[in-house]
Image (cartoon, grey):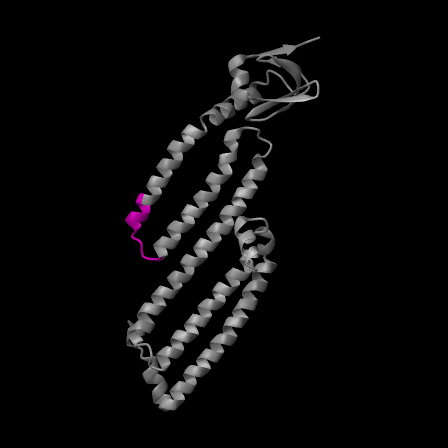
Amino acid sequence: MVLEQFDLPTLIRSLFSERGAVAVAVLVLVIGAIAGYLVWRGTKRFLCRQGIDDAVEGTLFEHTANNVGLSTVGILSQLAALAVYLLSVIVALNIARLVDTEFFWIRFTTLLPRLFVAALAVILGLVVGDKAKLVVSDRLKSVKLPEVSIIPEIVKYSIFYIAALIALGQLGVTTAALLVLLAVYTFGLVFLGGLAFKDLLAAGAAGIYLLLSQPYGIGDEVEIDGTRGIVQEINVFVTHVESDDVEHIIPNQRVLKRGIVRIRE
């Protein structure tokens, strides 16, 4: 309410002449340019000190940014500086009476922060999603099941989706619509995930049972569904059996279903 009644151009002209108001507008632009530069440098230095540049190394977003001569840290820093530049430009235009007070205090002060948060959410969503994919892929690289390869993609696009919902919320999309989108996405994720990971879930359940009951261990000679060899590794999803310099990777649900023969000599 106070902002709606505050008339910046009138206040400036009560202190200065018409030409003085124009000079103040130019001064605001100069100060905005300097402040934007300082914000850019400060933000970039802060992000680098926090290790953000190393954290995003190897992500698709960082690779794409590098291809056009940019970086994730640079984009975030420029985004912060751009907000300062835009603020100074709008203030200067308002002082020069090129933008009315209502637009400045109501439209600008509500729209610009929302646009900034929306853009930041999208950028962070892309970066975090790519990084999460790399981390999950690295953690699951020892699991030799084809279904596992889709898990990092699901993690990445789930983060993308959440970031998109945040951005849409900032742009004025109603909460009900966002909840509907979230419900549809969750249902699709659960339904399609259940179909895609049916064998993986079965292997995991069988693996937990085998790890708890321990019918065989590393170093045991076993025969599983016609495959004979020495057990090299057992994890939740698969059992590694080696014979004649050949490594067999057997899903645990197959071990449980076909049975196992432990050979004692």
Identified at 45% across, 43% down, the residue is: 157
- Quadrant holding the N terminus: bottom left
User: Residue 90 sits in which quadrant?
Assistant: bottom left
Where residue 146 sits in the image (x, y, percent)? 52, 29
Asked whether residue 52 is drawn in magenta, I would say no
- Quadrant holding the C terminus: top right
Identified at 32% across, 84% down, the residue is: 10
- Per the picture, the main secondary structure of the magenta-coloured stretch is helix
Identified at 44% across, 43% down, the residue is: 158
Identified at 55% across, 61% down, the residue is: 74
- For residue 136, above or below residue 90: above
User: Residue 88 sits in which quadrant?
Assistant: bottom left
What span is colored magenta in the figure? 171-180
- For residue 155, above or below residue 56: above
User: Residue 245 sits in which quadrant?
Assistant: top right
Front residue of 113 and 195: 195
